[in-house]
Amino acid sequence: MDGCRVLTTAQMREAYAAAIAAGTAGIDLMRRAGAAVAERAAAMAGPGARVLVLCGPGNNGGDGFVAAGLLAGAGRAVTLALLGARDALKGDAALAAQDWSGPVADAAAAVPEAFDLVVDALFGAGLTRPLDGAAAALVARLNRAGRPVLAVDVPSGLDGDTGAPRGEAVRAGETVTFAAPKPGHLLQPGRALCGRITVAEIGLSDEILAGTGTTAFANGPALWRARFPQLAADSHKYTRGHALILSGPATRTGAARLAARGALRVGAGLVTVAAPHAALPENAAHLTAIMLRACDGADDLDDLLADERLNAIVAGPGLGVGGPTRDLVRVAAEAGRALVLDADALTSFSAKRDELAAMLAEGGGTAVLTPHAGEFARLFPDCAEGSKLDRARRAAAAVDAVVVFKGADTVIAAPDGRAAINHNGAPWLGTAGSGDVLGGFIGGLLAQGMPPFEAAAAAVWLHAEAGRRHGPGLIAEDLPELMPGVLARLLGWAGPDRAPAG
């Protein structure tokens, strides 16, 4: 899914319609979809396995009929059960049903516990209301059965656009979707309900997908690799940017150091922590390659920024909430440098978002805001409705800056409407200081000249990949130290050449 376009259910309908208008029969698309489902089902259930294929009354059910026929031909003991009447099927689903020569059972009476695998082809991503009656009862029974489930398109009951279940929803171990993922595959809790996700190619060209106008993507290197900093033979520390991290007062300096270490490890040539005089000793006790400068307030920051080589600023971690922090942000914004705002810098502008937006606009620089759910709610109370993707996009437009709406399904949104949904997150990242390191990663990439949307998306992916690489026991200090390995793999660096032995 790396870098895949993400289509809403309406956009996917447009894509199907465009393919059919261009000469591909709808039944051919359905047969390709059913074949993809059968392939994954066969991998999940070996020869002789008992497979229950639950079909619904629409095109999702048609995919199920196709898959059932192919699975039976491959030696699986298939029971096909339909929710509704066979003669009520219409269009391509009716054509697909004609190819099934076996019996059709009543899905409402199905007993999932009796099977080795259940294929959920009841309802797809376009579901517009909560399941009820026999459908809801069947889904509840399927979830209680505890059998492996392969969902077709999305688990039945899941809203494909928001990732929210509409009442009872199937809990699948794997989901096969077609041509492109939908927001509901990547946004929580949908991602958890989908299990492993396979995106099957069924003949919808990239030109057709792009023609839907989608500007949402699954985050991954394919989305931003072309803009990722690359070192040349003549690169040196001054060509790799200089990130400035604003430190909080004494006894609240750790967050800034975490951000600084992140900026350095992700490739910034120079990193400086700017700290109040009273906080200089404790910062000095911990810093080596990272430089240290005194900064007791907005006037001192203004003086520091006379050095134009300081081209990216990270403000917020441990900085304190209130007027002095707002003054620091004002100076940083007016300087027109690339700016990352996190934590206390965001909370300081609760109920003052328009003031923040004006500061950012006046400076003319680039800004990335990185709120978690609580900070987002305080800063963007008018963006409380809709999917996480929609909310992040509205927030980015409101402040004319990139917004990284953090969480297990982090959304990176740009004010021009582009958005990326991250899907390689790891639960071990939920630890104190993890977000501070992420802010440093973004600042370090901005310092190297990476554009703000791409820098934010890359930093989120790298941060999550580091968490996945470490696993249990992760603490924030580990994340920067994992960057060399993550970057080496990303950039395909296998190590220096070695002379042959002997």
Image (cartoon, rainbow, N blue to C red):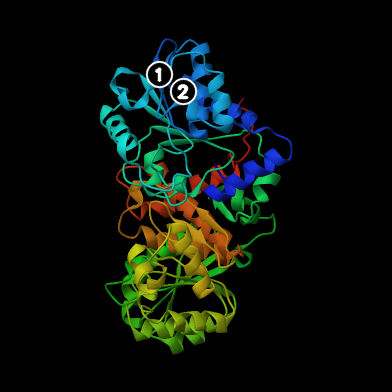
| Type of amino acid under label 1 | Val
Q: Quadrant of the C terminus?
A: top right
What kind of element bears circle 1?
strand
Total number of numbered discs in the rendering: 2
Residue 496 in percent (x, y) is at 61, 41
* Badge 2: residue crowd in 10 Å (few <14, some 14–19, many ≥20): many
* Badge 1: residue crowd in 10 Å (few <14, some 14–19, many ≥20): many
Residue 71 in the figure: left or right of residue 286: right
Residue 137 in percent (x, y) is at 28, 34
Residue 119 in percent (x, y) is at 42, 26
Residue 336 in the figure: left or right of residue 211: left
Q: Circle 1 sits on which residue?
A: 51
- Image disc number at residue 76: none
What kind of element bears circle 2?
helix
* Observer-nearest of 404 and 221: 404
- Mark 2 / mark 1, whichever is N-terminal: 2
Q: Residue furthest front?
A: 87
In the displayed structure, 119 sits above or below 436; it is above
Residue at point 30% right, 17% down?
114
Q: Which quadrant would residue 34 be assigned to in this image?
A: top right
Q: Nearer the viewer, mark 2 or mark 1?
A: 1
Q: Which quadrant would residue 115 be assigned to in this image?
A: top left
Instruction: Give the Cα separation between the discs numbered 2 and 1.
Output: 9 Å
In the displayed structure, 453 sits above or below 106; it is below
Are the residues flagged by discs 2 and 1 in contact, CB closer than 8 Å?
Answer: yes
In the displayed structure, 44 sits above or below 378; it is above
Q: Circle 2 sits on which residue?
A: 41
Q: Which quadrant would residue 416 be assigned to in this image?
A: bottom right
Question: Taking the image as drawn, is residue 102 in sight?
Answer: yes
Residue 255 in percent (x, y) is at 35, 66
